Amino acid sequence: MNNSIAMKRFEVIVEMEYHDALIELLKRSGIRGYTVIQDAGGRGARGLRNPDDRILPDENAVTIFACKEDLAQKVLNELQPAMKGFGGICMISDCHAQTHFDN
């Protein structure tokens, strides 16, 4: 993979009520860029989340970001205790990226 950078990819799924706190945590940890997918649906530990349910909406958001290994460990140190309060799930995988910024 020419000109690519080895990184860690994070996919964090939390309820929307915790999303602002998650973003603040990421900013404090040094993450400058991320992607958010709101109203994510699916089935997890808390049952079915249907984004089309207008009577009892359970809104989830998926936040995706990638960073270099040293920053990933810093983020993980902050994220692990916070996730106990947030609930949800955090998935981490190895990836390679071509990017114009250093994260």
Image: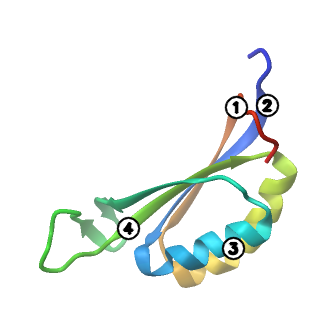
Residue 60, label in figure: 4
Q: Earlier in the sequence, mark 4 or mark 1?
A: 4
Asked if the residue under mark 1 is in contact with the one under mark 2, i.e. CB atoms within 8 Å, the reply is yes
Q: Which of the numbered marks, if any, corresponds to residue 5?
A: 2
Total numbered badges shown on the rendered structure: 4
Q: Which mark is residue 69?
A: none
Which label was assigned to residue 25?
3
Rendered image quadrant of residue 42:
bottom left
| Residue hosting label 1 | 97
Residue at the outermost bottom position: 85
Task: Find numbered disc 2 in the image and state the secondary structure of the residue it sits on.
Answer: strand
Q: Which numbered disc flags the more N-terminal residue, 3 or 4?
A: 3
Q: At label 4, which amino acid type do we have?
A: Asn
Q: Nearer the viewer, residue 85 or 99?
A: 99
Q: Secondary structure at mark 4?
A: strand
> Around disc 3, counting alpha carbons within 10 Å, would you say few (fewer than 14), some (14 to 19), or many (20 or more)?
some
Q: Would you say 59 lies left or right of 8 here?
A: left
